[in-house]
Image (cartoon, rainbow, N blue to C red):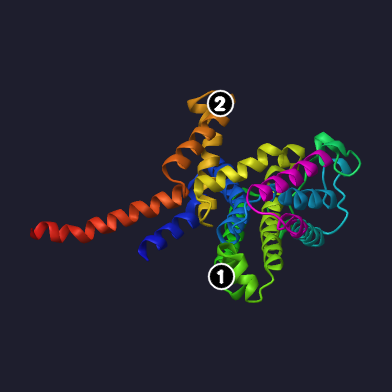
């Protein structure tokens, strides 16, 4: 209990002691990336479904909000008030996740992975080639975060606490949901879909609903990502961005929702500081090597490695008195 209290105190007080770069570019952005990855780890850990389209869902929400918000192209005139625009963006992301689920749950394994990849590439080329709605290759720039009570949500400390509060809330909601009848049924479908279907559960409906839940989580991450970057472009939803989410999930632990933030933090640290160890163009090499080492030595990611070390330490402490007596 004392350990978790210290961790919570450190997280809360962090922006008051760390430089602005560490608050926003490391802390806040790691949480944003972790939220999008959380949508994937939820599907993988409790539904047994690995999707490469979670960044696509985040992109749908981000593009929707960018279109409806004030940005450089429309000289600051928003189409809708920001609460309405935000609600529509989250709704569009949730709907996109649900529709992707409707198409994808007809398959499983590598086929599901490839279908979600194909959907993501379709959206990428759509945003890149459409100049009327999506502004083509340039995308949207100068998107401003809302001002609430006289404060911009993009102010460094405000944005950090916003990301932290949203991230904790989504994680708590996911961990609660998996203990509900829906979550338990989803895990049963993951383990043995035929048995659940035989006792009367509508397997496909539960799987599509899981994609909808993951879609909402990814949409929240997409909105925060839009405010963080101040814009969105096809590169934000390209194949590199899609694969990066999978890499982050595997590094942290694909079977552990809390691994999403751990993997995102390590990914962001490497992304920002690999240049100090290698030249900038070698960033993907560093990420690839990290990914390879994690997969070879800890298939459960950093969370799995930590749990094994903790169990070994506890066994050592229990056996120490016996060894001393002998």
> Tag 1, which secondary structure?
helix
Q: Which mark is residue 149?
A: none
Magenta stretch in the rendered image = 97-126
Q: How many marks?
A: 2
Q: Residue furthest top?
A: 279
Q: Residue furthest right?
A: 132
Q: Please check the rendered image and state whether residue 144 is part of the magenta-colored stretch, yes or no.
A: no
Most foreground residue, 157 or 309? 309
Q: Which residue is drawn at the image coordinates 87% and 50% (left, top)? A: 77
Where is residue 171? Give x, y as percent.
57, 62
Residue at numbered disc 1 = 176
Q: Callout 1: 10 Å neighbours few (<14), some, many (20+)?
A: few
Residue at numbered disc 2 = 282
**Between discs 1 and 2, the one toward the N terminus:** 1
**Residue 86: which quarter of the image?**
bottom right
Residue 207 against residue 77 in the figure, above or below: below
The rendered magenta stretch, by its main secondary structure, is classed as: helix
């Amino acid at each position: 209990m004392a350990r978790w209290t210290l961790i919570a105190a450190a997280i809360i007080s962090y922006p008051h002691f760390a430089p602005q770069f560490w608050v926003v570019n490391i802390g806040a952005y790691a949480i944003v990336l972790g939220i999008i990855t959380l949508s994937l780890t939820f599907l993988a850990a409790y539904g047994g479904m690995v999707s490469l389209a979670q960044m696509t869902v985040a992109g749908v929400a981000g593009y929707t909000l960018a279109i409806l918000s004030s940005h450089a192209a429309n000289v600051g005139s928003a189409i809708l008030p920001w609460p309405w625009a935000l609600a529509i963006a989250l709704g569009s992301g949730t709907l996109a996740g649900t529709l992707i689920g409707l198409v994808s749950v007809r398959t499983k394994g590598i086929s599901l992975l490839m279908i979600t990849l194909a959907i993501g590439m379709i959206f990428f080329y759509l945003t890149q080639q459409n100049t009327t709605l999506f502004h083509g290759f340039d995308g949207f720039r100068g998107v401003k975060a809302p001002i609430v009570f006289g404060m911009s949500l993009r102010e460094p400390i405000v944005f950090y606490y916003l990301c932290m509060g949203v991230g904790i809330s989504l994680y708590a909601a996911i961990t609660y949901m998996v203990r509900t009848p829906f979550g338990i049924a989803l895990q049963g479908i993951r383990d043995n879909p035929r048995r659940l279907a035989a006792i009367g559960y509508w397997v496909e409906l539960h799987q599509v609903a899981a994609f909808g839940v993951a879609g909402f989580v990814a949409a929240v991450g997409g909105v925060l990502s839009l405010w963080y970057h101040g814009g969105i472009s096809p590169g934000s939803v390209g194949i590199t961005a899609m694969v990066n989410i999978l890499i982050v999930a595997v590094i942290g632990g694909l079977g552990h929702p809390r691994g999403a933030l751990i993997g995102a933090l390590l990914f962001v640290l490497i992304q920002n500081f690999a240049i100090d160890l290698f030249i900038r163009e070698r960033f993907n090499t560093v990420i690839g090597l990290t990914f390879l080492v994690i997969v070879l030595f800890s298939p459960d990611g950093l969370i799995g490695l930590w749990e094994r070390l903790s169990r070994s330490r506890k066994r050592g402490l229990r056996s120490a008195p016996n060894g001393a007596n002998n």
